[in-house]
Amino acid sequence: MEFRVLGQLEAWRDGERLALGQIKQRSLLALLVIHANQAVSTDQIIDELWGEKPAVDRHNALWIQVSKLRSTLEPGRIPRSDATVLATRSPGYVLQVDRDHVDAYRFELLVEEARACTPSDPALSSLLLSEGLALWRGRAYEEFVYEPFVQAEIERLDELRVEAVELRLDADLRCGRAEELVAELQSLVHQHPLREHLSAQLMLALYRSDRQADALRAYGRLRRRLADELGLDPSAALQRLEQQIICGDPALRPDHTSGAFYREWSTTSTTVPTAGTAS
C-alpha cells in the first residue's frame, strides 16, 4: 500500500489508485495516516470527525466507515479475518503501513538526509531536496484544509516544505549558482515577504551576481516591511549581512562555501511564521 497526502489524499495498491469513497471515509483515512502505526482511540476519531452531533449514533457510524475503508484497502481479505492494513488495536484503530510508503514521511527523510550532507556535498543535497520537493502535488491534505483535525499537520508540513526550499537554495548557492537563482528567490520573497532567510539568500545571490545595490535594496524592503507591519528591526544576522555586502566582505565570495553565512543561516529561524507555500 502507498499513501499520498502532499496534495489530494490518494491510496495506491499494486500501481492502481483506489477509489476512497465519500468525504467521511476519506477523513477517517487522513486522520489515520497522520497517526500512521499509532493506535487512535475511537473517542478521538469520533470527536475529530463527528464532533458534537447527538442525533447521530456516532459509534455505529464509525464502525460503518471503518468497514467500508477496510473493504477499499483490502478488497481480497477473507470475511471476519484480521485486517492487516486498518487493524483493530485498543483503544481504537491503527493504520499499519511502511513509513517509506507515505509520501510525507519520504519527504521528511529526504530533507533529513540533505540537511546532513549539505556542508560536505551540496550538489547531492540539492538533488535529494529536489527529489523530495517533487513529491508535492499541491498543499498537504489539500481537500481538508478547513478541517480542524488536520490543521496542525498541514502547518507542520507547509513549514517543512519552505525550509526544504531554503535548504536547497543554500546548497545551490554553495555550488556557485547565484545568478540563476535570483529570479526564483525574488518570487519566493514576494510570496514570503517577512521570511528573513529567503531575503538573506536573495541578498547573497544578488551580491554574487555583481548587483550590490540591488542586494542592499532587498535589505531595505525587508527592513521597511518589518517596521511597518510588526514594529521590528531586522535580526542581528541580517544586519551583519548588510554590513558585509556594504564592505565587500571576502567571506561572501562563492568559494567560501563553509563560511559564516551558511553556519549562521543554517541555525537562524525566520522572524515571523510563514504564510502560503513555496513551489
Image (tube, rainbow, N blue to C red):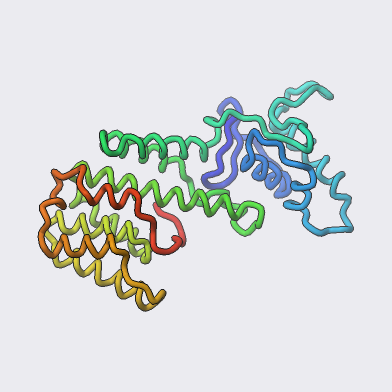
Q: Can you say whether 225 is above or below 208 in the image?
A: below
Q: Residue at x 30, y 72 (%)?
A: 223
Q: Residue at x 11, y 62 (%)?
A: 247
- Residue 240, how many percent across, how many down? 22, 62
Q: Residue at x 66, y 30 (%)?
A: 96
Camera-nearest residue between 196 and 100: 196
Left or right: 154, with 70 as reference point: left
Left or right: 149, with 219 as reference point: right
Q: Can you say whether 227 is above or below 219 in the image?
A: below
Q: Can you say whether 70 is above or below 247 in the image?
A: above
Left or right: 245, with 191 as reference point: left
| Quadrant of the snapshot with the N terminus | top right
Numbered label tally: 0
- Residue 31, how many percent across, how many down? 67, 45
- Residue 275, how many percent across, how many down? 46, 62
Q: Residue at x 48, y 46 (%)?
A: 137
- Residue 100, how many percent across, how many down? 52, 30
Q: Residue furthest front?
A: 236
The answer to which quarter of the image holds residue 200 is bottom left
